[in-house]
Image (spheres, grey):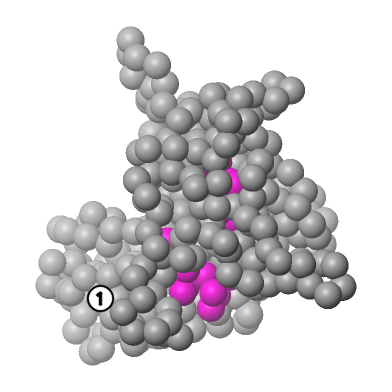
C-alpha cells in the first residue's frame, strides 16, 4: 500500500542492456534512480543518445522482451513493474499511466482515423458508450488546440500536420487523466504559440488533478518553465540532480554547464558566439573506465579516468537537494559570507 503523499513512481537502479547473439551487450541505461510524487514535475535532460527515451520505455514496460535485459526496480504505487505480466501493464497503461511519444507519425496507426484512436482509450478504460466517447474525443481535441475537431476525428494521421498529430497524441494521453504522465519531447514538432499552449495544458493537469509528470527533453527552456526538479543524464547515467532554480543558477557538472552555455541568450550582446560542447555524445568512454564525459570535458584530469574504491565516479551528495557525479565540478567565486554564490560557470 502506498504511503499517503508518497511517490507515485519510484525507479531504483534501473538498467537496460541490449544484447545480440555473439556480441557484448550495450548498456543504454546504467543504474538510474529517481522518484516523482503526485503534483510534481521532474525533468530528464540530455543530448540524444543519453538514455532518456529508453528509460521511459522501460518504465512503461514497452521494450521488447527479446534481446533486451531490464534490471533494477520500477514501482508504481508500490507495485513492481519490472517483470510484470503483459495483462497487468496493459490494464495500467492509458488509465493509470500514459506516455506522449516523441514521433507522432510512427506512433499513430496510419490506417485508422484519429477519432477511432482517441475513442479507443475512452472505451477501454472509462465507462462510456461510443456516442459519449465521441463527444469526449471532440472536447479533448479542442482542449489541445486542434481546430475543427469534429472534422479532424474523421481524418487519418497523414491528413494532419506534424503539430496536429502531436496534439492528437497528447489528447489520447490525457483522456483518462492518468496519475503518471511521461512526455517524451512533447513539443518538438510544434510552433512556439502551440508549444506554450501545450505546456500550459500540462501545467494545469499537474495542478488540477495531481498528476505526476516526467518531462523528457533537451529543450532547457521547457525545463525552466515547467519542471520542479531536474535530472541530467549522460551515457545512461544521471550525472547531476538539483532543484530547477539551483541547477540553472549554479550548474556543477561541466556537462550541465555546457548545455546551458550552448543556449542562445536574449541578454547577450550582438555577435556573441555560442559555446557548444566539443565533440558529440558518441565521444564517451565506458563508465567502467572512468567518467564517460571526460573526453569532452574541459575540467577533466587524470583521476577522471581511474577507478576509486571499486566505484566509478559515484553520484554523491552535493548540498541540500543536490547530487553530483563529478570529481572536478564547476566552482563559483565565494560571497562575502564565505559561501558560494550563483553565477556563470567558469
Q: Which residue is at the front of the view, 307 or 79?
A: 307
Residue at the image position 23 percent from the left and 89 percent from the top:
148
- Say if residue 228 shows up in the picture: no
Image coordinates of residue 8 in percent, x first then y, are 68, 57
Image coordinates of residue 141 in percent, x first then y, are 34, 81
Is 167 part of what is drawn in magenta?
no
Q: Which residue is at the front of the view, 161 or 322?
A: 322
Q: Which residue is at the front of the view, 8 or 251?
A: 251
Q: Which residues are magenta?
A: 218-240
Q: Which residue is at the front of the view, 104 or 4?
A: 104
* Side of 59 relative to 11 (left or right): left
Instruction: Classify 132 as above or below 211.
Output: below
Image coordinates of residue 64 in percent, x first then y, are 38, 34
Q: Quadrant of residue 210?
A: bottom right
Residue at the image position 46 percent from the left and 66 percent from the top:
261
Q: Which residue is mark 1?
A: 164
Count of numbered marks = 1
Q: Farthest top residue? A: 22
Amino acid at each position: 500500500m502506498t504511503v499517503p503523499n508518497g511517490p507515485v513512481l519510484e525507479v531504483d537502479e534501473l538498467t537496460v542492456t541490449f544484447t545480440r547473439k555473439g556480441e557484448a551487450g550495450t548498456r543504454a541505461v546504467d543504474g538510474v534512480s529517481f522518484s516523482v510524487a503526485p503534483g510534481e514535475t521532474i525533468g530528464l535532460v540530455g543530448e540524444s543518445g543519453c538514455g532518456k527515451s529508453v528509460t521511459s520505455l522501460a518504465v512503461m514496460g514497452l521494450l521488447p522482451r527479446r534481446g533486451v535485459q531490464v534490471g533494477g526496480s520500477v514501482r508504481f504505487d508500490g507495485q513492481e513493474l519490472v517483470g510484470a505480466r503483459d495483462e497487468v501493464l496493459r490494464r495500467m497503461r492509458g488509465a493509470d499511466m500514459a506516455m506522449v511519444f516523441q514521433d507522432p507519425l510512427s506512433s499513430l496507426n496510419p490506417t485508422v482515423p484519429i477519432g477511432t484512436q482517441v475513442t479507443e482509450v475512452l472505451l477501454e478504460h472509462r465507462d462510456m458508450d461510443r456516442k459519449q466517447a465521441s463527444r469526449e474525443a471532440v472536447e479533448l481535441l479542442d482542449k489541445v488546440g486542434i481546430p475543427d475537431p469534429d472534422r479532424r476525428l474523421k481524418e487519418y494521421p497523414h491528413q494532419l500536420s506534424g503539430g496536429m498529430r502531436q496534439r492528437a497524441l497528447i489528447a489520447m494521453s490525457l483522456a483518462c487523466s492518468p496519475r503518471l504522465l511521461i512526455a517524451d519531447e512533447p513539443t518538438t514538432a510544434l510552433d512556439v504559440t502551440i508549444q506554450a499552449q501545450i505546456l500550459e495544458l500540462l501545467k494545469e493537469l499537474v495542478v488540477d488533478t495531481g498528476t505526476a509528470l516526467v518531462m523528457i527533453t533537451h529543450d532547457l527552456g521547457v525545463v525552466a518553465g515547467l519542471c520542479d526538479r531536474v535530472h541530467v543524464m549522460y551515457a545512461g547515467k544521471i550525472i547531476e540532480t538539483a532543484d530547477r532554480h539551483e541547477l540553472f543558477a549554479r550548474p556543477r557538472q561541466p556537462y550541465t554547464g555546457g548545455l546551458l552555455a550552448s543556449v542562445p541568450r536574449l541578454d547577450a550582446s550582438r555577435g556573441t558566439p555560442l559555446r557548444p560542447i566539443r565533440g558529440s555524445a558518441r565521444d564517451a568512454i565506458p563508465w567502467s573506465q572512468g567518467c564517460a564525459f571526460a573526453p569532452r570535458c574541459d575540467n577533466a584530469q587524470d583521476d577522471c579516468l581511474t577507478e576509486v574504491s571499486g566505484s566509478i565516479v559515484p553520484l554523491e551528495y552535493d548540498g541540500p537537494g543536490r547530487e553530483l557525479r563529478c570529481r572536478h565540478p564547476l566552482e563559483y567565486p565565494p560571497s562575502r559570507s564565505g559561501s558560494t554564490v550563483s553565477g556563470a560557470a567558469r
